[in-house]
Image (tube, rainbow, N blue to C red):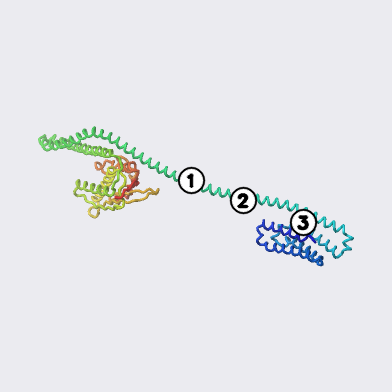
């Protein structure tokens, strides 16, 4: 019995292994099994029927040769070409040997040695190439395992990288949040420090100016009082004594009395201005508790608006102006220093009423003086919640050339004796340093002036 069916089974098994490594076994498994069945059938047929030995021998050789050359015709079996290359010489030599031995015995006997040598050489060739193929297959398998290990390592490294990046992002987010919290705490600390410095400055300045006021107020009162008394005495002198003088000196004496009266009037005028400046300094530096407390901004603004209006009405009965208010009902109570904030509002209201009264005096009945006050919640560009108080009037406005100086101490656009130049300076310090807010101005000369107060919202309680 020929060995070709067994060799065919061996070759088919090798094909199965190659297909499994290439991931194609499922596709060809059915055909491989058919090959096994054919090999078994040939073997059984050869054992069972002795009279068909020649036919069985040829069939088994042809089947084995067909199995061997499959990699040259089937693309999926290309990895088995090396095995086929090793076995094709043996398959051909074996077929020639059995055909000559069975059908041409005389020729076979005459060339027996040569045919046997050809078969042995083909076996040596097949065995050598099989060993080489096996070695290469192991090398490829090792390479495949190494490549798989590298891929697995790369996959693990990629997973570790993703986890690491996720941890870095989380840590970065935590650090960013901590940085923002620290920056907010630093900002609050700076604001608190500025408020403390402002409070200490106001207290120190209050003590200093209180002493100065006591030292200056008395001699200043003497200057003002005696100038007024001296003017009255000169008037009496002019009325009672001047007519009794000789005519040659009467005119000169009258001129001298008039000059002295005019000088004393100037002394009295500037003395009163100095007195107003001293009182303004006292107001500017007057000590307060400096403690913030929940404050109803709407009620505070309304109270000081009416206080300012009625105060000016008490001085000038002819003064009249319209008042418009728009208060945010949802504003609630805001942490602020009510005494200081009230001083700021009173100063702004006084300035607005003065501006519209001056414009009324110039334009007459065709002009309607109006002061508008509104409050609302706003958000700053940096995202801070703030309370905004707007004081607007349609008065004379502020000249652009002096707009940069209005917050300087002792600078005023009012005529001599009408203002001390301390109101806006005091207001600016209270808002920016005492409350950490902003005091901005928008104006058009001859048309309007608008002051905008923005105070950061700390703790807000609903009223």
Label 2, on which residue? 151
Label 3, on which residue? 86
Q: Mark 3 falls on what kind of element?
A: helix
Spatial separation of the CA atoms under disc 2 and disc 3 = 34 Å
Spatial separation of the CA atoms under disc 1 and disc 3 = 64 Å
Residue at x-position 24% and y-position 53%: 322
Q: Earlier in the sequence, mark 1 or mark 2?
A: 2
**Badge 3 local density, few (<14 within 10 Å), some, or many (20+)?**
many
Q: Where residue 172 is drawn, which disc sits there?
A: 1
Q: Are marks 1 and 3 in contact (CB under 8 Å)?
A: no
Q: Is the residue 162 above or below the residue 194 in the image?
A: below
Name the mark nearer the viewer: 1 or 3: 3
Q: Nearer the viewer, residue 289 or 443?
A: 289
Q: Quadrant of the N terminus?
A: bottom right
Q: Can you give x and y, in whole percent of width and height, for residue 66 in the image?
A: 75, 63
Spatial separation of the CA atoms under disc 1 and disc 2 = 30 Å
Q: Mark 1 falls on what kind of element?
A: helix
Q: Hey, which quadrant is residue 25 in on the image? A: bottom right
* Residue extending furthest toward the front: 48
Q: Is residue 195 left or right of residue 129?
A: left
Q: Are marks 1 and 2 in contact (CB under 8 Å)?
A: no
Q: Mark 2 falls on what kind of element?
A: helix
Q: Hey, which quadrant is residue 14 in on the image? A: bottom right
């Amino acid at each position: 019995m020929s060995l070709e069916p067994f060799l065919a089974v061996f070759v088919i098994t090798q094909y199965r292994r190659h297909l499994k490594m290439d991931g194609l076994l499922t596709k060809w498994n059915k055909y491989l099994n058919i090959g096994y069945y054919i090999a078994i059938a040939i073997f059984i047929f050869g054992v069972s029927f002795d009279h068909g030995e020649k036919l069985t021998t040829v069939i088994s050789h042809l089947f084995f040769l067909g199995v061997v050359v499959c990699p040259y015709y089937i693309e999926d079996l290309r990895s088995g070409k090396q095995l086929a290359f090793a076995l094709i010489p043996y398959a051909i030599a074996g077929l020639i040997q059995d055909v000559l031995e069975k059908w041409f015995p005389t020729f076979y006997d005459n060339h027996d040695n040569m045919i046997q040598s050809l078969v042995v050489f083909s076996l040596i060739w097949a065995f050598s190439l099989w060993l080489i193929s096996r070695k290469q297959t192991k090398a490829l398998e090792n390479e495949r395992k190494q490549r798989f290990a590298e891929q697995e390592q790369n996959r693990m490294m990629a997973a570790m990288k993703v986890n690491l990046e996720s941890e870095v992002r989380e840590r970065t987010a935590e650090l960013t949040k901590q940085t923002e919290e620290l920056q907010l705490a630093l900002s609050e600390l700076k604001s608190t420090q500025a408020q403390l410095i402002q409070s200490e400055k106001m207290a120190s300045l209050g003590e200093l100016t209180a002493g100065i006021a006591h030292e200056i107020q008395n001699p200043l009162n003497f200057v003002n009082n005696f100038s007024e008394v001296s003017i009255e005495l000169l008037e009496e002198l002019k009325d009672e004594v001047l007519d009794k003088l000789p005519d040659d000196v009467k005119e000169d004496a009258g001129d001298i009395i008039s000059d002295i009266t005019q000088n004393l009037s100037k002394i009295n005028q500037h003395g009163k201005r100095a007195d107003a400046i001293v009182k303004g300094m006292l107001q500017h530096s007057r000590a307060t508790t400096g403690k913030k407390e929940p404050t109803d901004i709407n009620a505070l603004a309304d109270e000081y608006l009416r206080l300012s209006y009625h105060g000016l009405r008490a001085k000038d009965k002819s003064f009249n102006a319209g008042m418009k208010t728009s208060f945010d009902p949802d504003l609630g109570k805001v942490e602020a220093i009510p005494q200081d904030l009230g001083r700021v509002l009173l100063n702004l209201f006084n300035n607005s009423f003065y501006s519209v009264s001056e414009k009324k005096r110039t334009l007459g009945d065709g002009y309607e003086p109006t002061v508008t006050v509104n409050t609302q919640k706003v958000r700053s560009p940096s995202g801070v919640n703030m309370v905004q108080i707007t004081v607007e009037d349609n008065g004379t406005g502020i000249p652009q050339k002096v707009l940069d100086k209005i917050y300087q101490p002792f600078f005023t656009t009012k005529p001599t004796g009408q203002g001390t130049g301390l109101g806006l300076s005091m207001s600016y310090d209270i808002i920016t340093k005492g409350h950490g807010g902003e005091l901005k101005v928008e104006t058009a000369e001859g048309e309007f002036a608008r002051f905008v107060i923005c105070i950061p919202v700390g703790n807000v309680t609903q009223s």
